[in-house]
Image (cartoon, grey):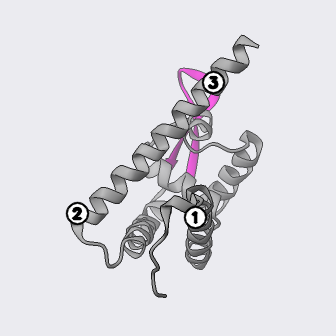
Amino acid sequence: MQQKDVDLSENPSFGRLIRVVSRLGRVYLHQRIHALGIGPPQFFILHTLYNHPGITQEEIVRRIGGDASTLARTIRRLEKIGYIQRRRDPGNRRAYRITVTAAGEAMRGRLDSLLSGYSEMLTRGFLPEEKQAAWQYLQRMEKNILTALKQSEHVRKQS
């Protein structure tokens, strides 16, 4: 697909373009995740557990977001297929510590490969300095959004 120059004086919608890239990226990832025999929520839980073994269900919810009851069902499914195990937290009998089993660990390479392939696909044809610039621009956009959200929360609290 041929890239065309954009006349920035016409106020192009960065939000729309980011939304389109995000939606297409989700489609790309979901297709590949499903090919591994798991769903996207299971993928993100496993990925979180690889990086934070032994965290609680509540910590998973905080890290990846989403509905707590939906994530609880997804965790039970992962446990049922043998990818994770839940053990009572000795310090808090109501909480469970969740770890990846050997079967879940066997998936790690495939999941890591999927993520690195996704990043590579997104930046295919970029020069190293373009990758760096794109990363910095996206981080600045993230910071702008977070600042705007904090300001709007501050305004709501004053109302």
Which amino acid type is shown beneath numbered disc 3? Arg
Q: Main secondary structure of the magenta part?
A: strand
Disc 1 and disc 3 in contact, CB within 8 angstroms? no
The furthest residue to the front: 9
Q: Is residue 94 above or below residue 128?
A: above
Residue where numbered disc 3 is placed: 93
Q: Check if residue 109 falls in the magenta segment.
A: no
Looking at the rendered structure, the secondary structure element under dot 3 is strand
| Residue 17 marker | 1
Q: Residue at 46% across / 87% down in the picture?
A: 2
Q: Check if residue 98 falls in the magenta segment.
A: yes
| Residue 129 marker | 2
Looking at the rendered structure, the secondary structure element under dot 2 is helix
- Number of residue marks: 3
First in sequence, mark 3 or 2: give its number: 3
Residue 127, quarter of the rendered image: bottom left
Q: Residue at 73% across / 43% down in the picture?
A: 67
Is residue 119 or residue 70 the one in the foreground?
A: 119
Which amino acid type is shown beneath numbered disc 1? Leu
Which amino acid type is shown beneath numbered disc 2? Glu
Q: Is residue 110 above or below residue 66?
A: below
Q: CA distance from mark 1 to mark 2?
A: 22 Å
**Percent of width and height locating residue 83:** 55, 59
**Percent of width and height locating residue 107:** 46, 67
Q: Is residue 51 visible?
A: no
